[in-house]
Image (cartoon, rainbow, N blue to C red):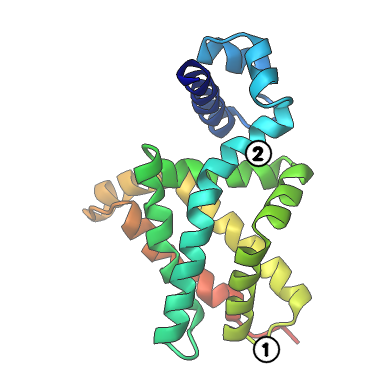
């Protein structure tokens, strides 16, 4: 049993790194098996298909992040009635940073994988996330909607999509941004600092009044 678990973990680790670097479409099962040093039969045995492997890679993060995020949003709402968008987004920083305890650079990898899912139109991933983490997603959307009741649901859909794109791009280029900040402005900033820098921008974008 230990051998099986080790093989499954090696496949997940290899797939995760390749998916984040190359994308889902450009990463073949052959490439994954080569990096994991396993045969194709092992992938089929543990996951059954590439789609199931993609979902399993995301699930390692989502199973940790989603409950923690819901908890922090709930605490934020209790402490701040009503909670502002900036407070809600800030409450997600710690659950995101905690992913670094799951995997080295887990925060960045998770957001890169999430971004890949949207960029590459992985419809099965959206189905997987919305069906397996329904309650947590509803808690988040409700908290955001309650904080910006003047934004109708169809507009909120677009704004949350733009918000996801902003955070994914920021984290994907975080190393370069930190180097520029250090070189041009003598500012030393870590990943937590980057996240806290982008939050006011996202909160303002989500809550801004509709154009006439």
Answer left or right for 208 relative to 98: right
- Residue 41 vertical position relative to residue 117 in the rendered view, above or below: above
- The nearer-to-camera label among 1 and 2 is 2
Residue 87 visible in the shown view? no
- Residue 36 vertical position relative to residue 59 in the rendered view, above or below: above
Answer left or right for 190 relative to 107: left
Answer left or right for 175 relative to 26: left
Residue under the point 39% across and 42% down: 102
Q: Secondary structure at mark 2?
A: helix
| Observer-nearest of 183 and 156 | 156
Residue 141 visible in the shown view? yes
Question: Looking at the rendered structure, which numbered label has been put on residue 55?
Answer: 2
Question: Looking at the rendered structure, which numbered label has been put on residue 150?
Answer: 1
| Observer-nearest of 62 and 163 | 62
Q: Position of residue 20 (x, y in %)?
A: 55, 34
> Residue 149 appears in which quarter of the rendering?
bottom right
Counting residues from the start of the chain, the first of labels 1 and 2 encountered is 2
| Observer-nearest of 13 and 181 | 13
Residue under the point 48% across and 16% down: 3
Residue under the point 46% across and 69% down: 71
């Amino acid at each position: 049993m230990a051998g099986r678990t080790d093989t499954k973990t090696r496949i997940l680790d290899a797939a995760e790194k390749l998916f984040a670097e190359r994308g889902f479409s450009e990463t073949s099962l052959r490439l994954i098996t080569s990096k994991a040093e396993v045969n194709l039969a092992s992938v089929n045995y543990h996951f059954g298909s590439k789609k199931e492997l993609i979902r399993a890679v995301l699930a390692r993060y989502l199973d940790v992040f989603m409950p923690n995020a819901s908890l922090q949003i709930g605490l934020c709402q209790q402490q701040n009635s009503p909670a502002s968008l900036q407070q809600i987004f800030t409450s997600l920083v710690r659950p995101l940073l905690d992913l670094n305890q799951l995997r080295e650079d887990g925060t960045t990898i998770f957001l890169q994988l999430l971004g890949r899912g949207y960029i590459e139109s992985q419809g099965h991933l959206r189905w997987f996330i919305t069906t397996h983490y329904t309650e947590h997603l509803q808690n988040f959307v409700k908290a955001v909607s309650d904080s910006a009741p003047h934004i109708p649901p169809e507009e909120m859909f677009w704004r949350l999509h733009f918000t996801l794109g902003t955070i994914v791009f920021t984290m994907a280029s975080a190393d370069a941004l930190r180097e520029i900040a250090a070189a041009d402005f003598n500012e030393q900033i870590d990943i937590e600092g980057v996240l806290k820098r982008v939050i006011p921008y996202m909160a303002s974008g989500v809550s801004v009044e509709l154009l006439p």
